[in-house]
Amino acid sequence: MNIVKTVGGIFLLVGLAMLAASSYLYVDQSDFIAGAKEADGQVIDLVRKRQDDDGSTSYTYSAVIRFTDDRAVSHEFVDRISSSPPRYSKGQDVHLLYAPDNPADAIVDDFWGRWAVVVILGGMGGIFSLVGGALFYREIYKGRTRIWLRENGTAFSVDFLEVERDRSQSVNGRNPYRIVAQGKNPFTGKLEQYLSESIWVDPTEYMSGRKLRVLVDPNKPSRHMLDIDWLADLI
């Protein structure tokens, strides 16, 4: 199983789901704003929320706001935004929007009051989609390159050098392995090292004294792969 491709696919799906949710919330919030009534309110209290992260404790604050609707009925609601330092101070006047049929459904009438959830969810969705898409596409491209080289590449032999840990990848604190080989590239005439794709089982015991095969694109020598398909039957 290609873990990088799997992780990339999961990130991409999660990101697209977040973007879809953000789009839905944008439309829903736009409808709310279009039909909302305006009012002026006042911050009467601050609600403190505790956050524990890696053994450290911090606090954020949300404003409790009181306002009177167009029927002279008093209402209170808690601002959806919780921050540190608090966005508003006790006694501060704020402008707000509320639903005519449910005045308790109210928001502070500023950018973050209107769009915080949409912006945050959309931003996270964009990041997840970009990272996941890049990982997924890279593995698809690498897979197609490997297929092309197996079918059309020119082969030559190189010597096994060592097995190393691939520190560029980590899953649950584990790093995969890579086989390192060395030999003269017949197209460039230079002594070069070649790295295998990542392997999640240590292949060292199968490598002693082995000659390995490199497949290279004769028109682009930098496009090559160390062929380790034979390992699949051993590990």
Image (spheres, grey):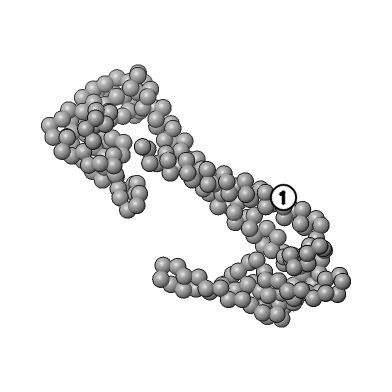
Q: Position of residue 66 (x, y in %)?
A: 74, 76
Query: Is disc 1 placed on a helix, strand or loop?
Result: helix
In percent of the image, x 62 and y 46: which residue is there?
20
Instruction: Determine the residue located farthest toward the front in the rendered image.
Output: 101
Q: Is residue 8 visible?
A: yes
The one nearer the camera, 26 or 179, is 26
**Residue 207: quarter of image:** top left
| Numbered-mark total | 1
Residue 220 visible in image: no
Residue in the foreground of this view, choosing between 93 and 185: 93
Snapshot quadrant of residue 76: bottom right
Left or right: 140 in relation to 159: right
Q: Identify whether 123 is placed above or below 108.
A: above
The spot of residue 167 in percent (x, y) is 30, 48
User: Is residue 2 found left or right of 111 in the rendered image?
Assistant: left
Give percent across and percent down for residue 119: 63, 55
Q: Residue furthest right?
A: 71
Q: Which residue is mark 1?
A: 27
